[in-house]
Image: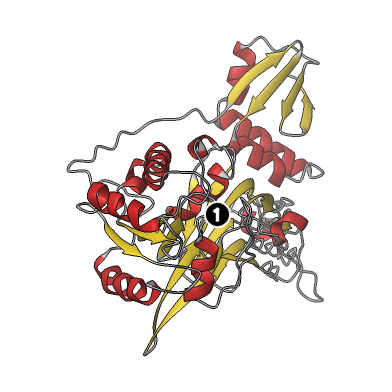
Amino acid sequence: MFYDQAKIYVKGGDGGNGIVSFRREKYVPEGGPNGGDGGRGGQIIFVADEGLRTLVDFRYNRHYKAERGQHGQGKNMHGRRGEDLRVRIPVGTIVKDEETGEILADLVEHGQEVIVAKGGRGGRGNARFMSNTNKAPTIAEKGEPGEKRTLLLELKLLADVGLIGFPNVGKSTIISRISAAKPKIADYHFTTLVPNLGVVDLGDGESFVVADIPGLIEGAHTGAGLGHAFLRHTERTRLLLHVLDMAGSEGRDPLEDFQIIQEELQKYSAELAQRPMMILANKMDITGAEENLERCQETLGDKYKIYPVSAATGEGLQEMIYAVAQILPEIPAPQLFVQEEEEHKVIEAVHEKRFELSREGELFIITGDEIEKHVHMTMFESDDAVYRFQRILKAMGIEDALREAGIQNGDKVLISDMEFTWEE
């Protein structure tokens, strides 16, 4: 099966925990703290691979988690860093963050890499907390949780030329004639349910890639027929070949067909409708095709180059291939994402709130990345660590905010997944 969309969950490795340890050797009294730091968690890295053609692997495996860092040890030995998880994805894949809609990467080259989930940093061992006022700290940190997010993957095939047109006009037969691709061909609509890629060999090491886009119909821009499912695969093509049935073998008018498909392209993407285009007047071996060809040349000949061909006999295909090969080098590759240059860029400093406070009855809820990270990394089984956490709450202004909100002894405070009881 051909899969060009997927939704997956990724999580970077958690950092390893720091450790509380003291040097204990004969003849070395009060050796001091020597707890090592935890190792950083592994990252999840997407690697573009031209050998992959679909996102089918992500249909059966939707969760990816990198290795966590190793915990620190005594004698100032730091934990080993977690192994990165490298995930192969097809060239031409766009990676989006589901929650924000942000485009994280557009992987268009073989070997291109992007980090989609960072590993958490390792927790510090107690050797890091030694100071002039605290020679024997019993504080260490847990590892920072790895970054987690849900990703949307969208594959847009990379092809130089895209064959478009109504169903059953001969696109699959043409690609089977000019390349080694062997698509399923039959005399009924939507024989082609997935895009087919074919490489056209020009000799002397020269070639170009053709994509046979499944037949489009009126209303395709709204998703009708195969609509959105495959219109996206035309976005990266440099040249469009519009295949028309000159014989009108199903009672359709090739000029009307051309106009309908052009309107669908315009409604889906105005930029796509302006892409360089050639017309392949197919089925010229059938009676009645010559009359329709003359009408097309009179109406469209001034704007588009029209090549009479017959996919059934192969007539005219070689001339068309040479014409495509000649014009392709002159057409720049389309830029999917264009960022306009700004003459003057103004950066305004915005002081974001370090936390948010809300209330549900007697439960006070504190949210915010900074304070939640401290909760996850604090070892609450250590009294010294608890005192340090209280100092952090005070320094961030959380204690004052809770008092202003009217907190009383015995009320509950929820931060991340930890619940605390307030006492003055």
From the image, which quarter does the N terminus lie in? bottom right
Q: Is residue 416 visible?
A: yes
**Near-viewer residue (182 or 137):** 182
**Near-viewer residue (306 or 195):** 306
Q: Residue furthest bottom?
A: 204
Residue 269 is left or right of residue 24, and the answer is left
Q: Quadrant of residue 309?
A: bottom left
Q: Position of residue 257 (x, y in %)?
A: 42, 44
Q: Position of residue 19 (x, y in %)?
A: 75, 59
Q: What's under tag 1, amino acid-wise?
A: Asn
From the image, which quarter does the C terminus lie in? top right
**Near-viewer residue (370 or 14):** 14
- Residue at which label 1 appears: 168
Q: Position of residue 149 (x, y in %)?
A: 64, 46
Tally the marks: 1
At 62% from the left and 64% from the top, the residue drawn is 185
- Determine whether 156 is above or below 316 in the image: above
**Near-viewer residue (142 or 280):** 280
Q: Is residue 145 visible?
A: no
Circle 1 SS class = loop
Residue 408 is left or right of residue 93, and the answer is right
At 55% from the left and 59% from the top, the residue drawn is 115
Q: Circle 1: is it few (<14), some (14-19), or many (20+) Cα within 10 Å?
A: many
At 68% from the left and 15% from the top, the residue drawn is 359
- Determine whether 326 is above or below 70 in the image: below
Residue 374 is left or right of residue 242, and the answer is right
Q: Position of residue 258 (x, y in %)?
A: 38, 46
Residue 154 is left or right of residue 58, and the answer is left
- Determine whether 63 is above or below 207 in the image: above
